[in-house]
Image: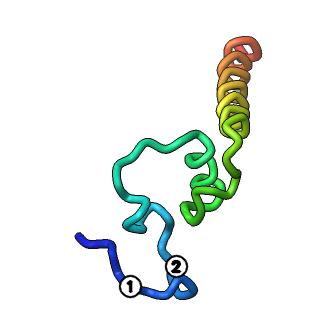
Amino acid sequence: MKTDFDIARSYVCAATIFNPEFNNFANITANQAWSLFFTAGRDDAALGDNPEVGQFFNNVLIAVVTAVVAGSFFFRSF
């Protein structure tokens, strides 16, 4: 499947991940991953280039999962 159509940028509704310049199986940073998540795949640079932003969201996700798991053990009803 080729994804290198020549369509004007104003008419493109496809997500960033389907553009030919993005789809090269390259590693992406945490910022790019969270930007794609928050923008529903539209923009991989929405959060900028600061790596601490991606680490912050990773740590928040880990903290939420840890709190839910710990809460389910500590506050379960018998």
Q: Is residue 59 left or right of residue 17?
A: right
Question: Dot 2, how many residues are within 10 Å of its Cα: few (below 14), some (14-19), or many (20+)?
Answer: few
Q: Is residue 53 left or right of residue 8?
A: right
Name the residue rendered at 72%, 39% in the picture. Answer: 53
Can you name the residue that lies furthest to the left here? Answer: 1
Question: Dot 1, how many residues are within 10 Å of its Cα: few (below 14), some (14-19), or many (20+)?
Answer: few
Q: Quadrant of the N terminus?
A: bottom left
Tell me which amino acid carries mark 1: Asp
Residue 28 location, x and y as percent?
Answer: 49, 44
Between 67 and 1, the one lying in front of the other is 1
Q: Compared with residue 72, is residue 3 higher up or lower down, i.e. above or below?
A: below
- Specify the quadrant of the image occupied by residue 75: top right
Q: Quadrant of the C terminus?
A: top right
Name the residue rendered at 43%, 59% in the picture. Answer: 22
Residue 65 location, x and y as percent?
Answer: 65, 27
Q: Secondary structure at mark 2?
A: loop
Q: Compared with residue 73, is residue 65 higher up or lower down, i.e. above or below?
A: below
CA–CA distance in space, label 2 to label 1: 13 Å
Q: To which residue does mark 1 refer?
A: 6
Tell me which amino acid carries mark 2: Cys
Q: Secondary structure at mark 1?
A: loop
**Residue 46: numbered disc:** none
Q: Compared with residue 56, is residue 9 higher up or lower down, i.e. above or below?
A: below
Q: Compared with residue 76, is residue 30 higher up or lower down, i.e. above or below?
A: below
Between 58 and 21, the one lying in front of the other is 21
Residue 51 location, x and y as percent?
Answer: 67, 37
Label 2–label 1 contact, CB within 8 A = no
Q: Is residue 30 left or right of residue 7?
A: right
Between 11 and 50, the one lying in front of the other is 50
Q: To which residue does mark 2 refer?
A: 13
